[in-house]
Amino acid sequence: MVVGHTQAQDMTRVQPMKMAAAEALWKSENPAAMSLFTWGNEPERKDVWAVKVPGLLSFLAMNRFEGEVRGIQDIQAEYGPGDYVPPVKWSYWNFRVMAGAGMLMLLLGAWALWATLRGRLETSPRLLALLVPAIVLPYAANSAGWIFTEIGRSEVEVRAHVVRDRRRLSLLPGLEDEELRLHAGVHREPKFGRA
């Protein structure tokens, strides 16, 4: 959990659009609420229905219950023309599958440890019955985490940083366009927006 918390803080700093998509955070908030469940309208970029915990996303992002977490619409405006928003529905739900499977593994592991220390593991039919299907949890967490990572770190996110950096002329001095494409891993002219 500590590693995941640290990675989420790094993601908020380095890939803010990915964090905003993982939380379906359409507009910047201070303090930012963490979504437990959101049914969103992705084309209109708004919530239809949501259950949120006030201030918790700010805590996860900054270790304090106050603090701004930037939203999809504000980040999109900062990046300029084009559509840099990853598929929010896929990012949001894969993030929840990853975190949920991780929490279930932690809880089942704690329960199994407690039963073992009390000498009751073999006589705990509910626990034993749950441990067998729990074999899939690490695979579910790993797969969902990988899908979330790759969807959230889409080409458009990388290109947005390249475009923003080129506008500010903050790239290495003397870096030519062809070198830029090679360093960014983009070997063709980027097509901004979705077809």
Image (cartoon, rainbow, N blue to C red):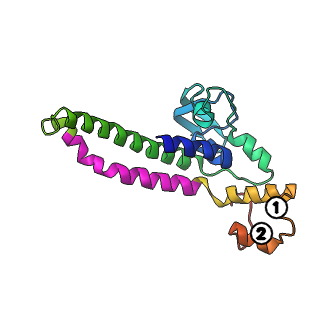
Q: Amino acid at mark 1?
A: Leu
**181 horizontally vs 94: left or right:** right
Quick one: label 2 or label 1, which is nearer the N terminus? 1
Residue plotted at (72% across, 53% down): 83
The Cα atoms of the two marked residues, 2 and 1, are separated by 9 Å
Residue plotted at (37% across, 54% down): 139
Give percent across and percent down for residue 32: 63, 30
Residue lying at the far front of the rendered structure: 117
Give the mark toward the camera: 2 or 1. 1
Helix, strand or loop: magenta stretch = helix
Q: Amino acid at mark 2?
A: Leu
Q: Which residue position is annotated with label 1?
A: 171
Quarter that holds the C terminus: bottom right
Name the secondary structure under disc 1: loop
Instruction: Report crowding for label 2: few under 14, some 14 to 19, many 20 or more residues within 10 A (C-alpha).
Output: some
Residue plotted at (35% across, 48% down): 137
Magenta region: which residues?
128-151
Q: Of 192 and 19, which appears nearest the observer?
A: 19
Q: Is residue 42 visible?
A: no
Image marks 2 and 1: residues in contact by CB distance under 8 Å: yes
Which disc number belongs to residue 180? 2
Q: Of 101 and 111, which appears nearest the observer?
A: 111
Give percent across and percent down for residue 166: 83, 60
**184 horizontally vs 90: left or right:** right
Name the secondary structure under disc 2: helix
